[in-house]
């Protein structure tokens, strides 16, 4: 195996190991409120994994709320069964939610109003007003938007907007998902979260690919800054294992961000081949020599501390490229759910294209940091 391919192989063995570890990011706690049958559980399953919350109209019981968690899954859903139209359940509902607000750390509240009911119920208004008063992080979600016409939907949106909350119309009908406001709901939700939670949220939501890409760039920026400081360490050779650890973590975080599921292994194999065969092979001479230091042991061939600028630029360009390739894959996969990894790399992402992304970003980053 050539050295450059060895670099890529080392990197990806590390990535694989990282991916086998538990995800350590912060949990996001979301409470979904609204009338029984409004479409709360459906919304949760639309945004995240299909089977996160149970759907179906249940009868509200005293225990109003079910907390849904999943093994190694950083989203916690407080799915309320919802209130009935009769007043009797309202006080109970409010009490439970107020209790939960006080005892659990809730980061977001999605209050669902069914557009199929064609009007906003008085109790929805009252409830949202309460949330506003208490300064809970609430938005209004107009669910089942396919069940009404444009005028009806606009009228309901306007009525809810009067309460001074963000309003998003959504529907589970596949053709309408991206046409309505689901992505806007996801984006707004992201703005309510702190950095650590934002990464978990961007990773697990399934519909806003640009949010994943943006979060990916954030991760890459952080990792490349760390690469720069590691490379400055004056002890010869000590930097190589540290650098590679930092890069493998970055690539693993990116792969996680895109939730590649069944395609993950095949995707990583393809990526490893491309990175070993093209990117590393075509790095400029000095950069390639520096990159060789990423292989533990091979560092001794080069000697000396790695140039911090090059370490930063390589890490950044590598991360940027992986992020972009994953993003493009998910975008294409959204258009064609049966898209295979092989088809993607054959038809949409050639080695030349990958090379060109890497080169452009590497050069830009390197020039920038020389200024
Ligand atoms: N037409 C349509 N039906 C929906 C939509 N969302 C949910 N439903 C249906 O509404 C019913 C109640 O949904 P569910 O999510 O269980 O409501 P919950 O009680 O608020 O959790 C189910 O039969 C869903 O299939 C939607 O966007 N469009
Ligand atoms: Mg439900």
Image: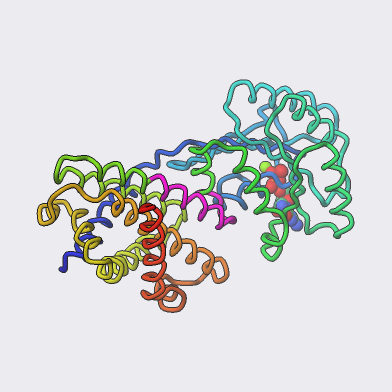
Residue 130 or 220: which is nearer the viewer? 220
Residue drawn at x 52%, y 67% as measured from the top left:
333
Number of numbered tags placed on the structure image: 0
Q: In the displayed structure, does residue 94 sit left or right of residue 320? A: right
The N terminus: image quadrant: bottom left
Residue 19 or 188: which is nearer the viewer? 188
Q: Quadrant of residue 152?
A: bottom right
The colour scheme used to paint the residues is rainbow
| Residue 208 within the magenta-colored segment of the rendering | yes
Residue drawn at x 59%, y 21% as measured from the top left:
103
Q: Position of residue 194 (x, y in %)?
A: 54, 36
Q: Residue extending furthest bottom?
A: 347
Secondary structure predominantly adopted by residues drawn in magenta: helix
| Figure check: 99 above or below 363 | above
Q: In the displayed structure, does residue 181 sit left or right of residue 114? A: left
Residue 169 or 32: which is nearer the viewer? 169
Q: Quadrant of residue 354?
A: bottom left
Q: In the displayed structure, does residue 193 sit left or right of residue 89? A: left
Q: In the displayed structure, does residue 193 sit left or right of residue 111? A: left
| Residue 39 within the magenta-colored segment of the rendering | no
Range shown magenta: 203-222
Residue 281 visible? The answer is yes
Residue 57 visible? The answer is no
Q: Position of residue 26 (x, y in %)?
A: 47, 36
Q: Position of residue 109 (x, y in %)?
A: 67, 36
Q: Residue extending furthest front?
A: 371
Q: Position of residue 147 (x, y in %)?
A: 81, 57
């Amino acid at each position: 195996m050539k050295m450059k391919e060895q670099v890529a192989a080392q990197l990806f063995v590390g990535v694989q190991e990282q991916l086998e570890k538990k995800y350590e990011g912060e949990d996001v706690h979301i409470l979904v409120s609204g009338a029984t049958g409004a479409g709360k559980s459906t919304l949760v399953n639309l945004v995240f994994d299909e089977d996160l919350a149970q759907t179906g109209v249940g009868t509200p019981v005293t225990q109003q709320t079910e907390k849904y968690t999943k093994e190694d899954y950083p989203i916690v859903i407080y799915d309320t069964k919802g209130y009935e139209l009769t007043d009797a359940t309202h006080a109970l509902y409010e009490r439970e939610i107020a209790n939960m607000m006080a005892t659990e750390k809730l980061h977001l509240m999605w209050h669902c109003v069914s557009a199929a009911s064609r009007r906003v119920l008085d109790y929805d208004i009252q409830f949202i007003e309460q949330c506003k008063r208490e300064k809970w992080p609430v938005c209004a979600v107009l669910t089942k938007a396919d069940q009404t016409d444009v005028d009806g939907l606009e009228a309901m949106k306007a009525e809810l907007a009067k309460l001074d909350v963000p309003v998003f119309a959504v529907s589970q009908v596949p053709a309408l998902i991206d046409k309505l406001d689901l992505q806007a709901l996801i984006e707004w939700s992201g703005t309510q979260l702190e950095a650590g939670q934002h990464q978990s949220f961007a990773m697990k939501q399934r519909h806003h690919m640009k949010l994943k890409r943006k979060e990916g760039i954030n991760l890459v920026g952080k990792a490349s800054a760390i690469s720069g400081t590691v490379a400055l360490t004056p002890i010869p050779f000590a930097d190589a294992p540290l650098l590679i650890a930092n890069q493998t973590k970055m690539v693993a975080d990116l792969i996680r961000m895109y939730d590649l599921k069944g395609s993950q292994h095949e995707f990583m194999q393809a990526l490893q081949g491309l990175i070993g065969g093209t990117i590393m092979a075509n790095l400029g001479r000095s950069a390639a020599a520096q990159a060789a230091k990423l292989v533990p042991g091979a560092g001794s061939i080069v000697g000396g501390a790695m140039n911090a600028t090059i370490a930063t630029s390589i890490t950044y360009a590598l991360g940027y490229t992986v992020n972009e390739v994953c993003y493009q894959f998910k975008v294409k996969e959204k258009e064609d759910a049966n898209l295979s990894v092989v088809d993607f790399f054959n038809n949409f992402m050639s080695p030349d294209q990958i090379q060109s992304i890497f080169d452009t970003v590497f050069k830009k980053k390197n020039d920038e940091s020389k200024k």
